[in-house]
Image (spheres, rainbow, N blue to C red):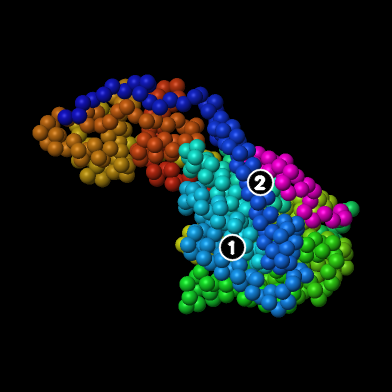
Amino acid sequence: MPSARPFSPATVHRLPQTGAHLSDYRISHRVLVLCALAVLAAGLSTVAAAILVWLINTITNLCFHLTWSSAEASPLGHVWGYWVVAVPVAGALIIGFMARYGSDKIRGHGIPEALEAILHGRSRIHPKVAVLKPVSAAISIGTGGPFGAEGPIIMTGGALGSILAQQFHLSAAERKTLLVSGAAAGMTAIFGTPVAAVLLAVELLLFEWKPRSLIPVAVAALVAACLRPIFLGAGPVFPVLPHVGLSGEEMGYAGALGVLVGLGSGIVTTLVYAAEDAFKKVPLHWMWWPAMGAVFVGMGGLIEPRVLGVGYETIHHTLRGELAGHVLLSLAVLKALVWAVALGSGTSGGVLAPLLILGSAMGAFLGHWIPAGDVPLWALVGLAAMIGGTMRAPLTAMVFAVELTHDFNVMPALLAGSIASFAVTALWLRRSILTEKLARRGQHITCEYSIDPFELARVQDVMDTQVPTVPSTMKLQELARRIAAGDPILAGHQATLVLDPEQRLKGIVTRGDIIRALPDAAENETLTVEEAGSSPLTVTYPDEPLADALNRMLAQNIGRMPVVERERPDHLIGYLGRSAILSARQRLHDEEHLRSIR
């Protein structure tokens, strides 16, 4: 027969006095360890970015100009004539073999794979990916693939951060922080945009806004920004003549341009996945698909050589207003088609650089008909709008455009354009170009962040004040009969609290306790609820955050807790069960969906 155990204030889980344990953020000194590791991850990612750029330039010079040089180069002015079609095909064949016999994680543009590792792989990335991803991307871009280096370096930097975290046996949450730190450092090293890299982490990769992750990621981005001049040079990637100021008229036109670019963004996203669906119908192994897509890339390069390769020089010309209208139109259309087919084929490459070309070309082309501002302004607005709409990261897009050009005065116009484009694609398409790939793998995610309602509510907001109690001297069989008879208070709860004659909390008796003790009660009719119940108790306080109470219930594997006064932990004032906890979620639902008539 279970023995009764005395209840005393020392047996309950005590918390500090009201308010003393509450803070704005949950953070510990572990963040300093993560910052130190983030510095190391940033250094590795910056070196990886420099190696990637060197490989791209070397392969480009070798394949298109038959020279061994690591100087910056593009496929323009190549020596192959019509045979240029064979160059991207050869590169794609190599990538197909690398993906099949090396790792299929190198397929695609990198960011969805990083998201998948964070959300479903406990932020673990295999070391093989850290090597094969940049090499495959360099081959793809160096042989004319219409991609950028940012997606692969984000995946590579993330892999380096993840490997580092695994070596130090960090938790899954800490691995995520280092993975994203490496990714942000890689993006900073390529583009020199530390603020945009941190915003990209917040809007797309972290899935949280917490100091424990934000601080190390920012440290990594800043370290990469300091190292970048040593390895890749200083200054903005696309320097332009800064604008003096903007009028209200220009702000309105920026929003209108954002809407048009948002429509173009939706079309481009649709094209990419239409191409992917078409390749899935091809009766050949997927390792051959990149080569098939590369044939289309090479043919596009015959018509307009600017669609081949990264295209940074083309972006710079567009942002300075140096390309004519018909060239801009053909560039936008051909780049969209070639990029969609190549990306849909499953080859390796990034999305940011193609989006920069598409957005700036659309903005410059439409800017010829805008009666305010100048073409370079609208090219920059179009660039930000394309990124904001396609990647669903409008704040990143705005800051990214500013850091690329150092044209800080146009920031309000960039905000108008990127937000307008974001609104169009968010209303039109269910998922972005990044999350659509995950959804097709059965891994849908939501990108809306909000405060957990359990963090906002206190126990007293949801606790049940009609507490199910019985005296400690009650016989167990009597309690069982009352529950079976449908007692309105006892029957509605899975547990009953036990009080002594002075109404002090003595313990708790659950349905499971009753079932286990009933055989003993049949032999010993004097068995009381106190003897059958459980103590010591895990209790909660009325002013405690509901999230803390819920976490303690999960840790203790219990489904309910007594609510007691802090000063008198044996004085019962409420009952917290699962149904009460769910009422906090119900309140949020009502705030979202119930409309007041007044």
Whether residue 320 can be seen here:
yes
Residue 374 lies in the magenta stretch: no
Dot 1 crowding, Cα within 10 Å, few <14, some 14–19, many 20+: many
Q: Quadrant of residue 491?
A: top left
Q: Quadrant of the C terminus?
A: bottom right
To which residue does mark 1 refer?
Answer: 348
Q: CA distance from mark 1 to mark 2?
A: 20 Å
x and y percent of residue 513 in the render? 24, 37
In the depicted view, which residue is nearer to us: 131 or 59? 59
Whether residue 356 can be seen here:
no
The stretch in magenta equals 216-243
Q: Quadrant of the N terminus?
A: top left
To which residue does mark 2 refer?
Answer: 46
| Residue at 57%, 75% in the rendered image | 292
Q: Is residue 576 above or below residue 158?
A: above
x and y percent of residue 417 in the render? 75, 60
In the depicted view, which residue is nearer to us: 237 or 112? 237
Q: How many marks?
A: 2
Q: Is residue 222 toward the left or the right of residue 240 in the image? A: left
Dot 2 crowding, Cα within 10 Å, few <14, some 14–19, many 20+: many
Residue 236 lies in the magenta stretch: yes
| Residue at 58%, 41% in the rendered image | 213
x and y percent of residue 367 in the render? 83, 68
Q: Is residue 42 above or below residue 319?
A: above
Residue lying furthest left in this view? Answer: 523
Q: Hey, what amino acid is under mark 1?
A: Ser
At mark 2, the secondary structure is helix
In the depicted view, which residue is nearer to us: 90 or 23? 90
In the depicted view, which residue is nearer to us: 110 or 368? 110
